[in-house]
Amino acid sequence: MAAPASRRVLGIALLALAALYTAWFHDDRHAAAALLVFALPPLVLAVPAWRGGRRSAFWAGVAALFWFSHGVMTAWAHPQEALFAWTEIVLALAVIGASSWSGLQARFGRR
């Protein structure tokens, strides 16, 4: 079935986002605050999303809209951080797609 695969993709994308933020902000002057705001939410959502938690998938999708917007804004305003920003954009889109997959499949799938 597609639901378990989408949960795995969601969990992996969330863990990848947490790793990305850890690498991105490791030398930042306010690294602890940045990791608390950016790396902790996807890390906290990853395990329940992997296990199929509907609430965690919903909140991951909502947070991914923020992550997507942050990536676009950073790619536009800080070209020196473009690699991190574009990776964030791609991972945010993966989170949105994976968190929405079961709903899209239920709505548009074969009956």
Image (tube, rainbow, N blue to C red):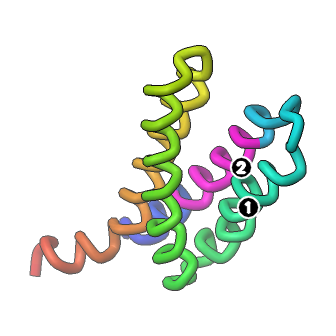
Does 24 sit above or below residue 46? above
Q: Which quadrant holds residue 46?
A: bottom right
* Residue indicated by mark 1: 43
Q: Is residue 37 left or right of residue 61?
A: right
Residues shaded magenta: 10-21
> Is 30 in the magenta?
no
Which residue does the image show at 54% across and 39% down from the upper left? 88
- The answer to which image quadrant residue 51 occupies is bottom right
Residue drawn at x 11%, y 74% is 110
Gap in angstroms between the C-alphas marked 1 and 2: 6 Å
Q: Main secondary structure of the magenta part?
A: helix
Query: SS at mark 1?
Result: helix
- Dot 2 corresponds to which residue? 18
Q: Quadrant of residue 45?
A: bottom right
On-image quarter of the C terminus: bottom left
Kindly identify the residue that appears in the image at 79 percent across and 36 percent down: 25
Looking at the image, residue 13 sits to the left or right of residue 58; the answer is right
Amino acid type, residue under disc 1 in the picture: Leu
Instruction: Report the side of 102 relative to 54 (left or right).
Output: left
Q: Upstream in the sequence, badge 1 or badge 2?
A: 2
Asked whether the residues under the numbered discs 1 and 2 touch, taking CB atoms below 8 Å apart as contact, a structural biologist would say yes
Q: Residue 32: horizontal and vertical position, in percent?
A: 89, 50
Residue 105 in the image: state x and y as whole percent. 24, 71
